[in-house]
Image (cartoon, helix red, strand yellow):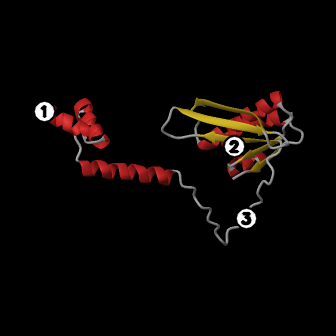
Amino acid sequence: MLFSSVRQLYKSGPYHQLRLAQVYFQGIDRDPLELVRHAESECQAWFNANEVARTVVQEGLPEEPQVISLGNICLIDGSWTASTQYSGCGWVWFDSGGNIQLLGTRNFDRRESALHSEVEALRWAMENMLQHSTCQNFGTDCKELIAMIKDPHAWPSFATELERIETLLICFPDFDIIHVP
């Protein structure tokens, strides 16, 4: 009896074959309606994840000058979370034609804060630019990092990190760092 009902189920189509395989091999016995609803929600989630968000322009906010060309610039970014053992950083160097010439990523023991990771990203990118290019322009999404570089004495808790940056700055006579949102 079981064999004949399995044969009927198998002959009835792909949905039933999948259901039979799930029950037999994985021990999964779901209500068919629940299975369809789950598939629909997964499909909707996939479409939502692949939807391009529209940019909303808010009036009344001061506009910052945007970078028009990413020529001969090294973009940097640091990554930090309080709950992980590691922090990370990365940089990418664009030549004067806007082409990626070199990039780097790395992880390291978690720093004290997100800003410490941003400083580490800048230091590492500067060292690499000294070795591999003549690029002296850097871009970051961290406004605090820019303020820190422009006035290091206002950030005494970062004195050690900024001392290393200031030493590297000696090798960059035309150093510039800009905000790239």
- Which circle, 3 or 2, is nearer the viewer? 3
Q: Quadrant of the N terminus?
A: top left
Tell me, for residue 74, which label it has, or none: none
Q: Earlier in the sequence, mark 1 or mark 3?
A: 1
As helix, strand or loop, the secondary structure at mark 2 comes to: helix
Residue at the disc numbered 3 = 63
Single out the residue that lies furthest toward the top: 131
Residue depicted at x 82% and y 39%: 95
Residue at the disc numbered 2 = 156
Residue at the disc numbered 1 = 2
**Residue type at tag 2:** Pro
Q: Residue 12: x and y, percent?
A: 25, 42
Q: Is residue 28 visible?
A: no
Q: CA distance from mark 1 to mark 3?
A: 72 Å
Q: Earlier in the sequence, mark 2 or mark 1?
A: 1
Judge whether 65 appears above or below 46 on screen. below
Judge whether 44 appears above or below 55 on screen. above
**Residue type at tag 1:** Leu
- Taking the image as shown, residue 63 lies to the left or right of residue 86, namely right
Residue depicted at x 81% and y 27%: 131
- Which circle, 2 or 1, is nearer the viewer? 1
Q: CA distance from mark 3 to mark 2?
A: 31 Å
Q: Residue 156: x and y, percent?
A: 69, 43
**Residue type at tag 3:** Glu
Q: Residue 107: x and y, percent?
A: 60, 30
